[in-house]
Image (cartoon, coloured by chain):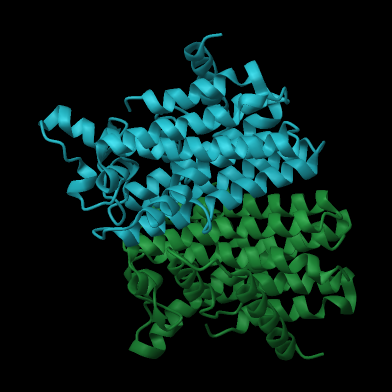
Chain colours: A green, B cyan
C-alpha cells in the first residue's frame, strides 16, 4: 500500500467535492463565491479531510457520510486562514505562494468570504443530514464535535491566546494550551467526527482521540522547527520569523535539539495509540511520520 | 392583551437566556467572552427572537424548543453588526449609543468575537438538539433554515450587494433583492424556524412566510424613511446620511411620500396574511404596526 498515492487520491476526491459544494446562484453579489473559491481551492495538503477519510477507511465506515463533514472542516480551516491573514490580524500578503484573499478582493470582501465559508460549513452538514437522515443522531453529534472544535473553547480560543501573547514570553503550559486550541482542536475534529460517523466503539474513539492529540502537537512542534531551519537555509542564521516577531515557540522554549526529541516522542505516542488497530492503521501511522518529515 | 408588556416580557426572557448561554471556561483567552457579551448584551429590540416567540405562542408550540434557536439568530444578527461596523466595512464608531466592538476591544478581537458568535449560534442549536432529540428532524430543518438565511444566498449575499452598490445608483429590482437578503432573510428565519418547531401546517407556514417577507420589507422602507426624517429634524434639510453617502434607498428611488404609501401597503399585506389565524395573531399584527411606527 502506497501512502503517496493514497494522499493524492483523497486530495483529488476532496477537491472535487469542495468544488461541487461551492456553487451559488448567479446574479448580484455572486462575487462572494469567487472570493470563497479563491482561498478554498488554493490547494494545501487537505490534512484535515484526509484524516477524516483515513479514519473512515480504517473503521470501514461509509465514505459518503464522511465527505460533507470533512469538507465542512476544510471550509472552517480556510475561513480561519482568511481572517488570520487580515491586516488587523497577522497582516500577511501571501499564503501558499499566492496573494492573500484581502489582497485580491479587498478587506471587506475577505471578511465576508470568511464569514460565508464558516456559515457554509454548517449549511453543508445540515443539508446533507436533512437529505440523509439515517443515523441522524450520530450526524448531529459529529456536527457538534466540529462546532465545539471551531468555537470559543476551541480554535478561536487559541487565536485569542495567540493574539494576547504577542511580544510576551509565555510558559510551556500556556504554549501547549494555545496550540491545543488553535491547531489541535481542528485536527481532532475530523478524526473524532469521522470516528463517530464510522461507528467507532468507545475504546476505538478514545484511542483515536489520543492519536489526534499527539499528531496535533507534532504538527505544531514541526512548524516551529521548520520556521527556524527554514531561516537557517535561507539566511544562514538560526533565528526564525517567529523569534524575530517575539513569539514563544517550542524552539524558543526548548532549543532545536530538544524540540526534535519532543517531536519524535510525540509522533511515537501517536503511532503507539493505534497499535491495537494493527495493519488497518497503516495510513494513519504513516501520516504521523509524514507530519514529522514534511518540508512545508 | 398589551403589546408593550408582551414585548418587555419576551425581551427579558431572551436577555436572560442569552446571558446564560454565553458562559465560558476561565483561563487564557477568556477575554473573547467579554467581547462577545459586550455586543450581544448591548440591547436592541430583540425583534428576531421576539418574532420566534410570538409565532410559537400563536401556534401553541413548546417555547423551550424555540428559545435556543431564537437566541442563535440573535447571535448571528449581532456578529453581522460587529463585522459590519469594522473599519474595512462601514467604519462605524458607535452603535446603540455606545462605542462599537472594535473601538473597545480592537479590530482583531472584534473580528474573532464576530466569528465566535456565528459559531456559537450553531454550537447552541446543536447542543440543545443533541440533549433534546425529540423531533430531531424538525430541529435539524429549523437549523437549516437559519443557516441558509445567514449564508451566501441570504444575509451575507445582501451585504455583498450593498458593498458593491456603494456610490452606484441601483434600480428597484436590485434594491429589493439586496434588502430581501440583507435584512429580510434574518427576519424570515425566526418566523419560519419557529413555525416549523411549533408544528405549523403547510398552509400556516406559507402564510407566515408571506407575513415575514412583508415585515422584512417594511422594516427596511421604514429605516430609509427614518434616515431622511431624522436628518430633517436634526439638520433642517431633507437629505439623510444614506443619500449623502450616495446610497440608493426607497426614499432616493421614490421620494418620501411614495415610500410612506409603500410602507403602509406592505404592513397591510403583512397583517392580511394573518387573517385566517384570527385573534391568535394579535401580537404579530401589532408587531407589523410597531415596525411602521417605531422611531429607532
Relative to B145, is A37 on the left or the right? left
Depth check, front residue: B251 or A288: B251
Q: Please give the name of the residue rendered at 45% of the width and 35% of the height, measured from the top-left corner.
A: B266
Depth check, front residue: B194 or A219: B194
Q: Position of residue B152 (x, y in %)?
A: 51, 59
Q: Please give the name of the residue rendered at 66% of the width and 40% of the height, measured from the top-left corner.
A: B206
Relative to A292, is A129 on the left or the right? right
Q: Position of residue A171 (x, y in %)?
A: 47, 54
Q: Looking at the picture, does residue A39 appear above or below residue B163?
A: below
Relative to A178, is A203 on the left or the right? right
Depth check, front residue: A133 or A271: A133
Q: Looking at the picture, does residue A167 appear above or below residue B139?
A: below
Is residue B154 visible to us here? yes
Residue A210, by quadrant, is: bottom right
Q: Please give the name of the residue rendered at 57% of the width and 76% of the height, measured from the top-left corner.
A: A260
Relative to A161, is A266 on the left or the right? right
Depth check, front residue: A187 or A285: A187
Q: Position of residue A27 (x, y in %)?
A: 47, 66
Quarter placement of the N terminus of chain A: bottom right
Residue A142, by quadrant, is: bottom right
Is residue B99 visible to us here? no
Q: Looking at the picture, does residue B205 appear above or below residue B60?
A: below
Q: Looking at the picture, does residue B71 appear above or below residue B172?
A: above
Amino acid at each position: 500500500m502506497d501512502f503517496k498515492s493514497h494522499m493524492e487520491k483523497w486530495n483529488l476526491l476532496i477537491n472535487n467535492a469542495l468544488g461541487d459544494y461551492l456553487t451559488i446562484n448567479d446574479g448580484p453579489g455572486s462575487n462572494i463565491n469567487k472570493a470563497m473559491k479563491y482561498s478554498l481551492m488554493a490547494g494545501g495538503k487537505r490534512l484535515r479531510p484526509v484524516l477524516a477519510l483515513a479514519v473512515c477507511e480504517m473503521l470501514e465506515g461509509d465514505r459518503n457520510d464522511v465527505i460533507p463533514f470533512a469538507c465542512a472542516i476544510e471550509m472552517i480551516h480556510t475561513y480561519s486562514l482568511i481572517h488570520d491573514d487580515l491586516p488587523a490580524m497577522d497582516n500577511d500578503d501571501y499564503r501558499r505562494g499566492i496573494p492573500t484573499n484581502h489582497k485580491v478582493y479587498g478587506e471587506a470582501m475577505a471578511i465576508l468570504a470568511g464569514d460565508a465559508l464558516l456559515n457554509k460549513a454548517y449549511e453543508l452538514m445540515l443539508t446533507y443530514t436533512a437529505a440523509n437522515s439515517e443515523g441522524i443522531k450520530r450526524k448531529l453529534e459529529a456536527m457538534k464535535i466540529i462546532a465545539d472544535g471551531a468555537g470559543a473553547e476551541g480554535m478561536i480560543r487559541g487565536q485569542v491566546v495567540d493574539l494576547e501573547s504577542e511580544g510576551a514570553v509565555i510558559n510551556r503550559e500556556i504554549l501547549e494550551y494555545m496550540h491545543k486550541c488553535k491547531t489541535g482542536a481542528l485536527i481532532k475534529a475530523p478524526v473524532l467526527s469521522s470516528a463517530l460517523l464510522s461507528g467507532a466503539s468507545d475504546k476505538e474513539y478514545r484511542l483515536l482521540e489520543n492519536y489526534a492529540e499527539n499528531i496535533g502537537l507534532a504538527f505544531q512542534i514541526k512548524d516551529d522547527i521548520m520556521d527556524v531551519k527554514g531561516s537557517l537555509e535561507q539566511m544562514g542564521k538560526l533565528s526564525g520569523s517567529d523569534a524575530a516577531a517575539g513569539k514563544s515557540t517550542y524552539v524558543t522554549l526548548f532549543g532545536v535539539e530538544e524540540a526534535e526529541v519532543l517531536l519524535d516522542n510525540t509522533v511515537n505516542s501517536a503511532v503507539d495509540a493505534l497499535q491495537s488497530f494493527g495493519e488497518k492503521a497503516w495510513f494513519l501511522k504513516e501520516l504521523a511520520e509524514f507530519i514529522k518529515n514534511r518540508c512545508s
